[in-house]
Amino acid sequence: MDQPSEAARGRSEVIVISDGTGDTATAAVKAVMLQFQADWKLRVFGGIRHESEVRRAIDQAAGANALVVFSLVDKRVAGALLREAGARGVPTVDLLGSLISKVAQHLHAEPRHQPGLLHAFSDEYFERIDAVEFAVRHDDGANLETLFEADIVLVGVSRTSKTPLSMYLAQRGYKTGNVPLVPSVEPSKALTELDPRKVYGLVVDHATLLTLRINRLKELRASPHSSYTDSDSVELELRRARKLFRQQRWRTIDITGRAVEETAARILDLYQAALG
């Protein structure tokens, strides 16, 4: 007996079609889907440069009753996609076409319509690679002897999103290290002697932190009965962290209820202002 399709079971699907990696369109789709409480699936078709590849992707979309979000700068390939989608009844969203058109009108210039420019090899690309490698080497307090080379250093108690933030900022090209605050252990001089303008102290609401830690122990199948998840101990850790941040003149960033992208944007605003 045939199994019902995901669409028939109420699971929506979005297909991203891009002439590059699809990262830009994927990020846009994920940001939009956060606004909906829906069970959905994402598929990405990257490196689409020919009409035959478009037909294959649209065929997949038609079979899954999916919405297609595309970012194609080659007008010929984009036109082929729209024709094929129209013939198959597949709904589409052109992520770049209208924006390119508006910018062209504003600049009174003709766009190049050349795929892959965003991810072409450049000095900026290699800087991002270096930043990611730096973040990996300086994650969770590692290699403190070279922490001074960082653009940004994140400090906080356990479960304050230090690693995800470090990796996100590294993807933006900023060499980022992160150092955990451990109860009963004094911070290293390698940290406290840094320029305070590059150090950011992360805090979070007590109840949120307690929940994060309890869930972490469940994932690890560890005993939930420890100072790590003791309410009074957690509160004390946060108070000591805030005191340290004030003493060291580090900017305090409250991550409560914020996505990694939002926290990173706040840090970068402060970072640029400090440079300025």
Image (cartoon, rainbow, N blue to C red):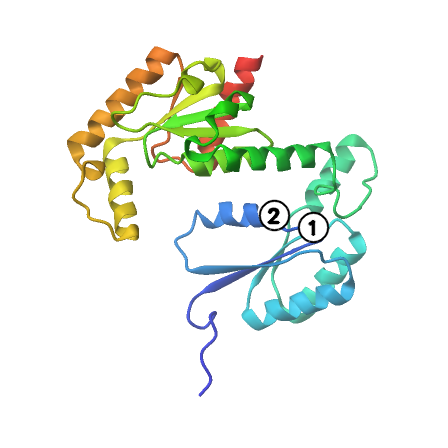
Tell me: 262 left or right of 52: left
Give coordinates of residue 211: x percent, y percent.
25, 42
Secondary structure of the residue carrying tag 1 is loop
Tell me: 213 left or right of 127: left
Are dots 2 and 1 in contact, CB under 8 Å?
Answer: yes
70 in relation to 9, above or below: above
Secondary structure of the residue carrying tag 2 is helix
Which amino acid, by three-letter code, is at mark 1? Gly
* Label total for image: 2
Would you call the spot at circle 2 few (<14 residues within 10 Å), some (14-19), or many (20 or more)? some
Q: Quadrant of the C terminus?
A: top right
Which of 256 and 81 lies nearest the eye of the viewer? 256
Which residue corresponds to the image point at 52% horizontal and 29% vertical from the top-left?
176
Q: Farthest bottom residue?
A: 1
Distance from the alpha carbon under mark 2 to that under mark 1:
8 Å
Tell me: 204 left or right of 229: right
Which residue corresponds to the image point at 57% horizontal and 37% vertical from the top-left?
133
Give coordinates of residue 107: x percent, y percent.
78, 31
- Judging by the rendered image, the residue that carries numbered circle 1 is 20
Which residue corresponds to the image point at 42% horizontal and 60% vertical from the top-left?
39
Give coordinates of residue 31: x percent, y percent.
50, 45
Tell me: 96 left or right of 216: right
Residue 23: assigned label: 2
Which of 163 and 33 lies nearest the eye of the viewer? 163
Would you call the spot at circle 1 few (<14 residues within 10 Å), some (14-19), or many (20 or more)? many
Which residue corresponds to the image point at 75% horizontal and 32% vertical from the top-left?
106
Residue 238: assigned label: none
**Would you identify the image quadrant in which residue 149 lies?**
top right
Which of 159 and 40 lies nearest the eye of the viewer? 159
Give coordinates of residue 129: x percent, y percent.
63, 37
Which amino acid, by three-letter code, is at mark 2? Asp
